[in-house]
Amino acid sequence: MSFYFLKKDIKKRGDIITTDELINKINSCVEALDFVSARKYIEENISIVESNKYLLKRNARDILKFLTQQIESGYQTLSRKELATLNAINTYAYNFDLRGIKNIVKNESTLLIRSDIESYLNSDAVTILAGMGAIRKALN
């Protein structure tokens, strides 16, 4: 039994590649443990990869499953600016710089409203922000 695949043109980072080339590229990224690149390829071509998921290796299928679950649940990833802000909060909390933390809380209050923020903060930052009333500390 042989399979014949239609070679569709897929645009990827300025290049045009076929479906087979895309799947091979994702599989080679997964083999090289380059999960970031594999995720980018899958995110940018999710509909095509979804229809050809049986050609993916196990780790690539797991990445695809994870991404589709995130899309279905409405999860929004953090931007670089938001990650930099959280890193600054962690640094200020580690150094116990309350003035810096208060300034960030005043300017970036919408970021601290998100429910998944606590997983990005270190224990010092969680304690200080919960004490200030900027976030609700989850009971573990």
Image (tube, rainbow, N blue to C red):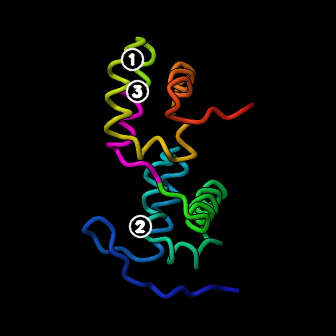
Q: Residue at x 40, y 11 (%)?
A: 95
In this rendering, the label closer to the viewer, 3 or 1: 1
| Tag of residue 98 | 1
Depth order, front residue of 81/29: 81
What amino acid type is highlighted by mark number 2? Glu
What range is drawn magenta here?
A: 77-88
Residue 134 place in picture, x, y as percent: 49, 34
Q: Which residue, as the protein is rendered here, is positioned at the far left?
A: 14
Residues at marks 2 and 1 touching, judged by CB atoms closer than 8 Å: no
In the image, residue 23 lies in the stretch drawn in magenta: no
Residue 31 place in picture, x, y as percent: 55, 49
- Residue 77 lies left or right of residue 99; in this view the side is right
Q: Which residue, as the protein is rendered here, is positioned at the far front?
A: 133
Residue marked by disc 2:
44
- 93 in relation to 140, above or below: above
Give the position of the C terminus as an image quadrant.
top right
Q: Residue at x 55, y 66 (%)?
A: 71
- Secondary structure, magenta segment, majority class: helix
Residue marked by disc 3:
89
Circle 3 SS class: helix
Q: Of the residues under marks 2 and 1, which one precedes in the sequence?
A: 2
Q: Of the residues under marks 3 and 1, which one precedes in the sequence?
A: 3
Give the position of the N terminus as an image quadrant.
bottom right
